[in-house]
Image (spheres, rainbow, N blue to C red):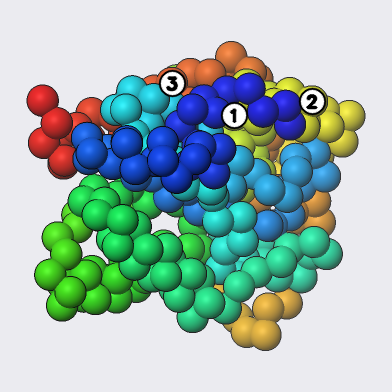
Amino acid sequence: MTETNFIHRKIGRITWTAYQKHLTREPIIFLPVGALEQHGPHLPMGCDAIFSEEVSLRVAEALNGLVLPPLTYGYKSQARSGGGQLFPGTTSLDGQTLTSMVQDILREVARHGVKRVAVINGHVENQWFLTEGIDLALREAKSNGNQMQIVRCEYWNFTPQDVLESLFEGAFPGVDLEHAALIETSMMLALYPSFVDLDNLPVDAYGQFPNYDSYPQNGHGVPASGVLAPASQSSAEKGNLLINSTVNAMVSALQNEFLIS
Ligand SMILES: [Zn+2]
């Protein structure tokens, strides 16, 4: 990945003195969270962290915010949303570890005096562990007299319904089954086309799951490719539409939530 976009938004690329100067205007601080998880034979395993960081950078650009280095590991993959833990390469954290990492980072930004944080999630399975880290950090901040407001966003929830309908022509399989499928493949084609191995795009198939999870995980119903819904209709054009509409909706939502005029 050549690092050219939005470097000035990345906290890991600026000095502490520049960061301190930014803090005087009380910027929204973004924490992108992803996973290291199989994304089919055609997409890199770091997809979820790449997307959450790229969305964060664009929203931060619009709102004059700053973006923390992404968490590039996440909670354990589940069969019905990521194919499960049985694929080589999928490398996951215990829930407690993820919760603690989020709590630790939020404790530190609270110490810096940050008042507004947006946790941008790119991996379905992370949601409640992020929530727990946020809750514990806020409890701590409150007892230390720090005021902090935190918003947790699953970026896919911001994609407008009419965009999904136009891209899927009425056949949107739902976010969970969209793992490594049309949405993620299109977004990667738009962002980093060289990361997509189009020669290895799997034959279109859907995960066939019961309405329960079975443990230990057995891989039943997971297509051998690890891709849970059709990806063959992906394109960079669709990816740009997805990214732009999602970013715009998140900008409005955060403006509204954080009362930026
Ligand atoms: Zn993903």
Task: List x then y, in percent, for residue 2.
Answer: 72, 27
Residue 48 appearing in the image = yes
Task: Label 2, secondary structure: give it.
Answer: helix
**Which residue occupies the foreground of this view, 235 or 255?**
255
Is residue 221 in sight in this rendering? no
- Nearer the N terminus, badge 3 or badge 1? 1
* Quadrant showing the N terminus: top right
Q: Residues within 10 Å of mark 1 (few under 14, many from 20)?
A: many
Q: CA distance from mark 3 to mark 1?
A: 10 Å
For label 3, the residue is 244
Is 215 on the left-hand or right-hand side of 152? right
The structure residue drawn at horizontal position 59% and vertical position 29%, both measured from the top left corner, is: 187
Residue that carries the numbered disc 1 in the rendered image: 187
Q: Which quadrant would the C terminus be assigned to in this image?
A: top left
Q: Which residue is mark 2?
A: 194
Q: Say which residue appears at 45% left-offset and 75% top-offset.
A: 100
Identity of the residue furthest to the right in this view = 199
Q: Residue at x 49, y 40 (%)?
A: 15
Cβ at disc 3 under 8 Å from ligand 1 = no
Residue at far top of view: 237
First in sequence: mark 1 vs mark 2: 1
- Name above or below for residue 133 compared with residue 61: below
Please state which amino acid type lies under the numbered disc 3: Asn
Picture quadrant where residue 137 is located? bottom left
In the picture, residue 197 is in which quadrant?
A: top right
Counting every numbered tag in the picture gives 3
* Residue 166 as seen in the image, left or right of residue 21: right
- How far separated are the C-alphas under marks 2 and 3? 20 Å
Q: Amino acid at mark 2?
A: Ser
